[in-house]
Image (tube, rainbow, N blue to C red):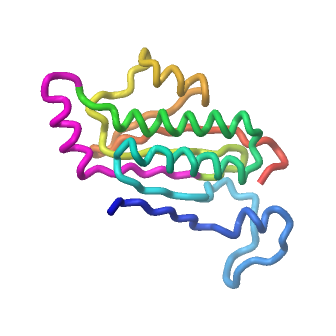
């Protein structure tokens, strides 16, 4: 059984912002907050077989935000590449053994947060055995698709962050 979960913590928010005046009981009225709003979180096995699910989720969220189809496609590719960085195996004669034992217990978490003018996509998981290299084709592709991705490591967890401007007047 896989470790897949999809959590849309504010499932009705997008619909409410599009014109519905109703809100669930106990929920405060919308404000012009700069706090990010979590649109979706997905945790899945760190395995290439789950990349299609990550790509489809990215397309769906970007589509809900009303991004043009070209940007939706670019974000799909960027999410695929970002997740693939965490799946990159080590170099050397023991590479297949190290990669398979590491992946057996690893998960990746993909988060989509709505900020006032941006969509922030974060991919996090165990620090890859090979750090992202600015000269690698994958990193160059990410930069071409989403500008300057962010990379940080804290307590053995790597996080790759992508941001996408949201056209004004959208979700």
Residue 163 coordinates in the image, percent (x, y): 60, 38
Residue nearest the viewer, comparing 25 with 138 = 138
Q: Which residues are magenta?
A: 91-112
Q: Is 21 displayed left or right of 54 in the figure?
A: right
Q: Residue at x 51, y 52 (%)?
A: 111
Q: Quadrant of residue 159?
A: top left
Q: Please identify the residue farthest to the bottom as the structure is shown.
A: 25
Q: Residue at x 30, y 35 (%)?
A: 128
Q: Residue at x 64, y 68 (%)?
A: 11
Residue nearest the viewer, comparing 170 with 87 = 87
Q: Is 146 displayed left or right of 97 in the figure?
A: right
Residue 90 coordinates in the image, percent (x, y): 24, 28
Residue 74 coordinates in the image, percent (x, y): 63, 33
In the image, residue 16 above or below residue 84: below
- 134 is within the stretch colored magenta: no
Q: Quadrant of the C terminus?
A: bottom right
Residue 99 coordinates in the image, percent (x, y): 23, 37
Residue nearest the viewer, comparing 116 with 136 = 136
In the image, residue 103 above or below residue 150: below
Q: How many marks?
A: 0
In the image, residue 67 above or below residue 130: below
In the image, residue 146 above or below residue 13: above
Q: Quadrant of the N terminus?
A: bottom left
- 100 is within the stretch colored magenta: yes
Q: Please identify the residue farthest to the top as the structure is shown.
A: 135
Q: Residue at x 56, y 58 (%)?
A: 40
Q: Is 105 displayed left or right of 15 in the figure?
A: left
């Amino acid at each position: 059984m896989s470790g897949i979960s999809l959590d849309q913590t504010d499932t009705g928010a997008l619909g409410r912002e599009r014109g519905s005046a109703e809100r669930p009981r106990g929920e405060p009225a919308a404000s012009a907050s700069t706090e990010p709003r979590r649109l979706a979180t997905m945790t899945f096995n760190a395995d290439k077989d789950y990349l299609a699910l990550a790509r489809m989720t990215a397309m769906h969220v970007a589509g809900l935000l009303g991004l043009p189809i070209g940007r939706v496609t670019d974000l799909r590719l960027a999410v695929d590449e970002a997740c693939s960085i965490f799946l990159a195996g080590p170099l050397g004669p023991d590479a297949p053994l190290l990669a398979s034992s590491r992946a057996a217990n690893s998960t990746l978490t993909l988060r989509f947060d709505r900020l006032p003018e941006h969509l922030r996509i974060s991919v996090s998981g165990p620090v890859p055995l090979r750090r992202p290299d600015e000269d690698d084709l994958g990193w160059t592709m990410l930069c071409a698709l989403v500008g300057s991705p962010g990379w940080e490591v804290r307590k053995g967890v790597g996080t790759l962050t992508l941001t996408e401007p949201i056209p004004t007047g959208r979700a």
